[in-house]
Image (tube, rainbow, N blue to C red):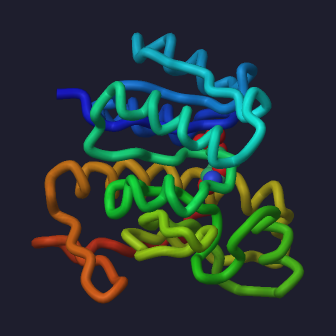
Amino acid sequence: MRSVVVLISGRGSNLQALLDAGLPVSAVISNLPGAAGLAIAAKHGVPSRVVSHKDFASREAFDDALAKEIDRYSPRLVALAGFMRVLTPGFVQRYRDRMLNIHPSLLPAFPGLNTHQRALAEGVKLHGCSVHFVTADLDHGPIVAQAAIPVRREDTAASLALRVLKQEHVIYPRAVRWFLDGKLVIESGTVSVKGNDAQLVFDDSP
Ligand code: GRF
């Protein structure tokens, strides 16, 4: 059974990582017609759709249309992979405890955009990425997995982005697999993995 619907807005490298891991992606939905990730879906024979936010007068109307498309596939999980729209509380509630996001920072530090520049500006020595369940609070929600990398003196936002992205491609497929295998337990806002404690990856490689 194909059971993950992936929402994208752009490049689609996390989508690619999910597909490369052999995860059962039943559809890809983009809010932007030109998203490069749509070609990745096509290459893998995965159906894709565009629901353009520009066609709707309000966030609620867009989210309703999006939910309708998602529900055509009756997915077990909705995976946000570079989906650049803020979702309404109603939409978040509908997929509560079955919607994941990948974010390029060690949450709760640096929610929002430009995370690599902000990490450099703050002089943090550790940076990374997080997979978390989506709640109505932007880029917050129970954390499923994190990967950390050291910030080096010579790092730029671009070099950080590259090393963090490599780790996104490690932890996102892993987290989605855990979810589909029924291994994730959310308790008092924190997530544990049944029979597994590898929720943290540390990558020190250049
Ligand atoms: C990633 O850095 C992800 O963490 C963020 O948006 C970017 C999407 O990249 N949410 P891609 O489209 O998966 O290549």
Q: Residue at x 60, y 57 (%)?
A: 88
Residue 82 spot, x, y in % from top left = 62, 46
Placement of the C terminus among the 4 image quadrants? bottom right
Placement of the N terminus among the 4 image quadrants? top left
**Residue 166 versus residue 132: which sits nearer the camera?**
132
Q: Residue at x 77, y 57 (%)?
A: 159
Q: Residue at x 52, y 47 (%)?
A: 80
Q: Is residue 48 above or below residue 88?
A: above
Left or right of 21? Residue 6 is right
**Residue 104 versus residue 132: which sits nearer the camera?**
132
Q: Is residue 184 above or below residue 34?
A: below
Residue 117 spot, x, y in % from top left = 85, 69
Q: Residue at x 59, y 16 (%)?
A: 39
**Residue 169 versus residue 95: which sits nearer the camera?**
95
Left or right of 120? Residue 16 is left
- Residue 164 visible (yes or no): yes
Residue 107 spot, x, y in % from top left = 58, 78
